[in-house]
């Protein structure tokens, strides 16, 4: 497999070779299950932040440069209909860890850390128990009990933005994206020869630095290796750029955090151009780190037996509909990139684009099946392994429950169903006991979701619309009942502790 290598022009990508830990080697020898390392692939998962499905070269984007991610797709399997079940950072990470949707894990709604019972069936715990060396580096955004973390991780190195540039021992400043590349290389160099690994690299990019609203390097800080990238290119306008689209929204969305943050990022032509270039530099910075990790896999002789998965935690508006952020039922919010590269696949199964509906909660089950272990019954997701191998399961999903329960600021709770022809959502604007505000979009005839069929007067609805609305209301009820309590029985999340302000210096 030949990848384009982009060298880090600012910092050396060569790290000192650490001594392998005798304790790790001894632990691997005592905990590994029967079977050679070659029978069980290594797994490397790269998890981007705030990246919509179309922002890849391989997905046809005219500007963004992602050669390494594109090559993963060209040599692997790309899922063109991949979604998150809840579009926000912490819920998506909790769903990734546990293989469940928000209605099941209720992280940040139920008080305390991520459900310890679900942590016991996380892909980290299952693979660690099976002899894998497990690691998570980067953005967690999920609180774990100490016992859960000990069950899940051999290596755990949290890293959060604020700021994106971190001071180094030599006094230099290093971007978190490149730090994760450094740490990933260290992890690979410390890997025992007789043990498989599962490493998740969770990026803070391409999340904006919300506390710094200066356009460009303030709001979307990029790694220095990307300086100058896209400087001479005009950024295309959002597809859904007509102000009338924003004006058509109900007040609770027009006045939401998505509109507030629009004015942080996209509200003037100059700010839009500057921030889009910066955003794409952050994304190309992730691609650069992938190239560094692939190079290290090859150097360590691990590339031929390492499955690489690339995805993101949620979609992103990028100015569409007059919005920023995510959090809602629209396609821009729910759709994500998803690529699975398995070097052991025959040539006939590579470079495929699958159209089946796939979810972020599927990835835990996928990694467990790659390792040859039993998928826990607690998982609401399904393994993608059969799809990567060219199979077409007859019972594959044709819809899924999408929802948002944790209520950050001005987005009300909502739940809905996205199937192959319609998106249905009901927002509990005035609480769970009041009639919800409903959306119904015909994805076949209105793929941009510009018409809310549920807002039509009942007397003017077509028979097809009436049937779809009735069926999807019932289907939403059924999916909710399968996953957890109804909205009225879910308590409000506990109040978050106010930030402690440091006293001003005299």
Image (cartoon, grey):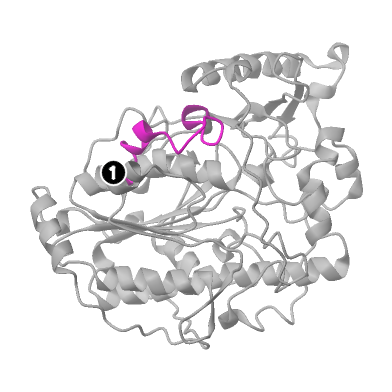
Q: In which quarter of the image is the N terminus?
A: bottom left
Residue 321 at x, y percent in the picture: 80, 47
Toward which corner of the image does residue 99 lie, by quadrant? top left
Question: In the rendered image of this protein, does residue 132 appear above or below residue 286?
Answer: above
Q: Image check: 501 left or right of 137?
A: right
* Element class at badge 1: helix
Q: Name the residue under label 1.
A: 125
214, above or below 127, in the image: below
Residue 169 left/right relative to 399: left
Q: In this view, does 101 lie above or below 149?
A: above
Residue 120 shown in magenta: yes
Q: Can residue 345 be seen in this view?
A: no
Position of 64 relative to 89 (above/below):
below
Is residue 338 magenta-colored?
no
Which residue occupies 84% across, 53% down? Answer: 241
Q: Give the range drawn in magenta.
A: 103-125
Q: Where's residue 358, x and y in %?
A: 48, 40
Residue 413 image offset from top left, x and y in percent = 68, 29
Kindly identify the residue that appears in the image at 67 percent across and 28 percent down.
Answer: 414
Q: Residue furthest top?
A: 459
Quadrant occupied by the C terminus: bottom right
Quarter-of-image position of residue 215: bottom right
Name the foreground residue: 135 vs 371. 135
Relative depth, front residue between 152 and 414: 152
- Residue 318, x across and y down, in percent: 73, 56
Q: Which residue is drawn at 47% across and 45% down?
A: 143
Determine crowd level at label 1: few under 14, some 14-19, many 20+ residues with C-alpha closer than 10 A.
many
User: How many numbered marks does the figure carry?
Assistant: 1
């Amino acid at each position: 497999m030949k990848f384009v290598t982009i060298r880090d022009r600012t910092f050396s990508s060569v790290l000192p070779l650490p001594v392998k830990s005798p304790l790790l080697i001894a632990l691997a020898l005592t905990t590994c299950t029967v079977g050679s390392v070659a029978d069980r692939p290594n797994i490397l998962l790269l998890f981007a932040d705030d990246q919509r499905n179309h922002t890849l070269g391989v997905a046809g984007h005219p500007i963004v440069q992602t050669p390494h991610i594109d090559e993963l797709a060209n040599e692997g399997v790309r899922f063109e209909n991949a979604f998150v079940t809840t579009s926000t950072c912490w819920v998506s990470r909790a769903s990734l860890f546990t293989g469940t949707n928000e209605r099941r894990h209720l992280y940040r709604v139920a008080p305390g850390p991520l459900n310890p019972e679900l942590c016991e069936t996380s892909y980290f715990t299952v693979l660690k128990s099976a002899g894998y060396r497990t690691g998570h580096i980067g953005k967690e955004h999920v609180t774990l009990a100490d016992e859960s973390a000990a069950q899940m991780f051999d290596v755990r190195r949290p890293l959060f933005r604020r700021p994106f540039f971190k001071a180094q021992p030599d006094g230099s400043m290093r971007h978190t994206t490149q730090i994760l590349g450094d740490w990933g290389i260290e992890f690979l160099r410390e890997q025992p020869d007789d043990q498989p690994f599962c490493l998740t690299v969770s990026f803070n990019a391409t999340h904006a630095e919300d506390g710094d609203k200066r356009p460009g390097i303030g709001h979307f800080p990029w790694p220095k290796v990307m300086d100058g990238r896209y400087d001479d290119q005009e950024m295309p306008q959002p597809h859904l750029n007509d102000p009338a689209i924003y004006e058509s929204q109900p007040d609770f969305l027009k006045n939401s955090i998505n509109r507030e943050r629009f004015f942080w990022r996209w509200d003037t032509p100059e700010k839009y151009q500057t921030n889009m270039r910066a955003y794409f530099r952050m994304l190309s910075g992730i691609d650069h780190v992938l190239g560094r990790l692939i190079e290290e896999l090859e150097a360590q002789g691990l590339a031929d037996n390492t499955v690489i998965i690339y995805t993101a935690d949620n979609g992103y508006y990028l100015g569409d509909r007059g919005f920023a952020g995510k959090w809602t039922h629209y396609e821009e919010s729910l759709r994500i990139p998803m690529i699975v590269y398995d070097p052991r696949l025959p040539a006939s199964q590579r470079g495929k684009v699958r159209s089946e509906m796939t979810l972020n909660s599927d990835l835990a089950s996928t990694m467990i099946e790659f390792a040859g272990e039993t998928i826990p019954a607690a998982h609401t997701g399904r393994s993608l392994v059969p799809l990567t191998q060219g199979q077409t399961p007859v019972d594959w999903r044709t819809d899924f429950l999408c929802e948002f329960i944790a209520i950050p600021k001005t987005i009300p709770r909502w739940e809905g169903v996205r199937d192959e022809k319609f998106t249905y959502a009901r927002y509990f604007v005035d609480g769970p006991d009041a009639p919800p505000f409903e959306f119904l979009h015909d994805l076949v005839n209105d793929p941009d979701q510009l018409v809310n069929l549920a807002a039509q007067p009942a007397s003017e609805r077509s028979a097809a619309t009436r049937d779809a609305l009735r069926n999807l209301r019932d289907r939403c009820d059924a999916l909710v009942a399968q996953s957890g309590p109804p909205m009225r029985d879910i308590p409000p999340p506990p109040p978050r502790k106010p930030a402690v302000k440091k006293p001003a210096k005299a």
